[in-house]
Image (cartoon, rainbow, N blue to C red):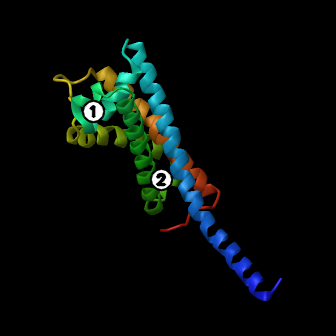
């Protein structure tokens, strides 16, 4: 092996070591978003089925955010689009929490209360910003308070909490950088 090969190998190993923290950051976002997305869509599917409605149609209703009423005539394609959009939102939420935690270290130090609070923030962001800007046809009357409280609790426990815990896990593993 020539000296040049050793230098190339060392450089390659150095690059791998330098990119390991980047992979850890990506894992925090991916696992947090994936877990939150799966838990939330499972809850939504069961809750929809319990009310005697179709989870398939529920996925189409997510797609109606971009397609409007036409999403209900699109079959499997629009249900798949709805599922994809749901995960885009979940990964987006995980990304927001991760980057906020880089500046607000309390989010990692107190991951459980921070995650629960973040779940509430996600719920209200969806209700007050995303849905009004979308093409979703909103009901004329507000949902009952009991349903609103259940949905807030779901976002706290199934969305915010897993995102915060995966972010903390990446931090504890030492794969994220510290900024103060």
Q: Residue at x 72, y 78 (%)?
A: 10
Closest to the observer, 110 or 98? 98
Percent x, y of residue 153: 41, 30
* Residue 163 vertical placement versus 136 (above, below): below
Percent x, y of residue 2: 81, 86
* Residue 26 vertical placement versus 162 (above, below): below
Question: Mark 2–mark 1 contact, CB under 8 Å?
Answer: no
Give how far apart the Cα atoms at labels 2 and 1 are.
34 Å
Report which quarter residue 66 is drawn in. top left
Q: Residue at x 38, y 30 (%)?
A: 79
Q: Residue at x 66, y 70 (%)?
A: 17
Closest to the observer, 88 or 143? 88
Q: Residue at x 48, y 27 (%)?
A: 42
Q: Residue furthest top?
A: 52
Q: Which residue is mark 2?
A: 107
Q: Earlier in the sequence, mark 2 or mark 1?
A: 1
Q: Can you see residue 122?
A: yes
Circle number at residue 64: 1
Percent x, y of residue 4: 74, 87
Q: Secondary structure at mark 1?
A: helix
């Amino acid at each position: 092996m020539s000296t040049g090969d050793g230098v190339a190998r060392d450089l390659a190993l150095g690059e791998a070591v330098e990119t390991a923290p980047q992979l850890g950051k990506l894992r925090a976002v991916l696992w947090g978003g994936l877990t939150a997305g799966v838990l939330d869509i499972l809850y939504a599917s069961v809750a929809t089925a319990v009310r005697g409605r179709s989870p398939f149609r529920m996925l189409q209703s997510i797609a109606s955010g971009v397609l409007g009423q036409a999403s209900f005539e699109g079959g499997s394609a629009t249900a798949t689009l709805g599922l994809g959009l749901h995960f885009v939102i979940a990964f987006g939420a995980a990304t927001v929490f991760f980057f906020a935690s880089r500046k607000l270290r309390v989010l990692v130090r107190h991951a459980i209360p921070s995650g629960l609070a973040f779940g509430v923030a996600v719920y209200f962001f969806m209700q007050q910003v995303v849905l009004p800007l979308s093409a979703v046809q909103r009901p004329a009357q507000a949902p009952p308070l009991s349903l609103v409280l259940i949905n807030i609790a779901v976002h706290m426990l199934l969305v915010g909490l897993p995102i915060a815990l995966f972010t903390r896990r990446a931090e504890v593993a030492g794969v994220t950088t510290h900024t103060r």
